[in-house]
Image: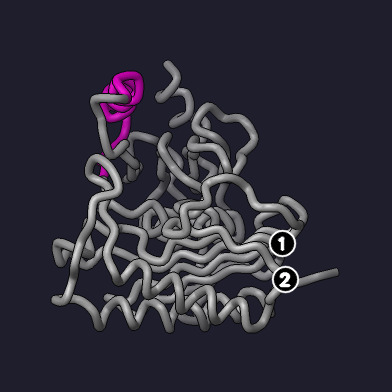
Amino acid sequence: MLNWQTERDVAIQAAKRAGDRVFESAGRIVTEHKGINDLVTQADRDAQEIIQETIGRRFPQDAFQAEENGLEERPSGNRRWIVDPIDGTTNFVHGFPFFCVSIGFEAEGELVAGVIYDPSRRECYSAAKGQGAVCNGMPLHVSATQNLSEALVAFGFPTDTSSKPDFMTRFGRAVPRIRSMRRLGSAAMALAYVAAGKLDAFWAENLKAWDAAAGVVLVREAGGLVTKSDGATYDVDSPLLLASNGLTHAPLASAIAS
C-alpha cells in the first residue's frame, strides 16, 4: 500500500523554498489586477516557478495545476499537483502576515498529500493519507467543540460579494447560530487551522482547486470532515466546501441551508 510520504516530503521542500522567497520579497512588491479584488504579484510567479522546478525535478511526468499558470481545467493524467504559490495575496500585499504556500497532491482522483507553509510564522503543516497530520513535526487533531453556539467558524467570501447575493443571505442566517466568525483571507490557512483545532469549521462557496486541495488532506488526516457546503460528497474541482471537526458539521450545514 502506498503511503505517499515521498510526495509529501517533496512538497515540504518545495513549499519551504518558495515560502522563504516570498517572505524575503516583502517590501518589494509589484502588483497587478487579475479581476475585481483579485491581485497577483511577481512573488506569486517566482514562488510558483520554484515549486514547479522542485517537484518537476523529482516527478517530471506529473501534471501541474497552479493558480498563476492559467490552467483551471483538470489536466490529463492520474497524478496531479495542485498549487497556490501564495494563498492570501491581498494580505501579503498589505503586509498583513496571514498568507501561505499551498501544495496538494492527487493520485487516481483522490487527494492523498498536502502541505501548507506559513512563512511568517515558519509553520509547516503537512499530511499524507493514512499518516496523520502534523505541524513542524507535532501531531494535529481537530477540536472537540460539539455545540455550534460555542464554535469559532471561518468563512470564505467571494471577491465580489455583489455577484453572490444568495451566499450573503446564507451567511446572515448562519452567523447568529455560532459563537463568532472570522474572515482570514486565506482558505488554505483556514483549513490548516481547522486541522490544528484553532478553528472549529470553515465554509466557502467560491474556491478553486488550488485554494483547498492541501488543506482538505490536512483536515481529514487530523480527524475532521470535509464535504460540499450542501453536505454532498466533496469534489476538489467544485467551489463548494464545508470543513469541520465533524461534531459541528451537521448543525452548520443545516444553518447554512435553512
Question: Residue 15 — which label?
Answer: none
Quarter of image, res 223: bottom right
Residue at screen point 31% across, 36% down: 158
Which residue matches tag 2? 61
Task: Report how far apart the C-alphas of labels 1 and 2 lie in the structure.
Answer: 9 Å
Residue 256 included in the magenta stretch of the image = no
How far from the left and from the top, in percent, is residue 116?
45, 68
What is the total number of numbered labels drawn onto the structure image?
2
Q: Is residue 196 left or right of residue 34?
A: right
As displayed, is residue 191 above or below residue 123?
above
The front one of 171 and 71 is 71
How far from the left and from the top, in percent, is residue 139?
53, 73
Which residue matches tag 1? 79
How far from the left and from the top, in percent, is residue 55?
59, 77
As displayed, is residue 210 above or below residue 201?
below
Q: Secondary structure at mark 2?
A: loop
Contact, CB < 8 Å: mark 1 with mark 2? yes
Residue at screen point 52% across, 66% down: 103
Q: Of helix, strand and loop, which mostly describes the magenta segment?
A: helix
Circle 2: residue type: Gln
Quarter of image, res 67: bottom left
Magenta residues span 164-182
Q: Which label's residue is closer to the chain start, 1 or 2?
A: 2
Circle 1: residue type: Arg
Residue 217, visible in the rendered structure: yes
Q: Residues within 10 Å of mark 1 (few under 14, many from 20)?
A: some
How far from the left and from the top, in percent, is residue 144?
47, 51
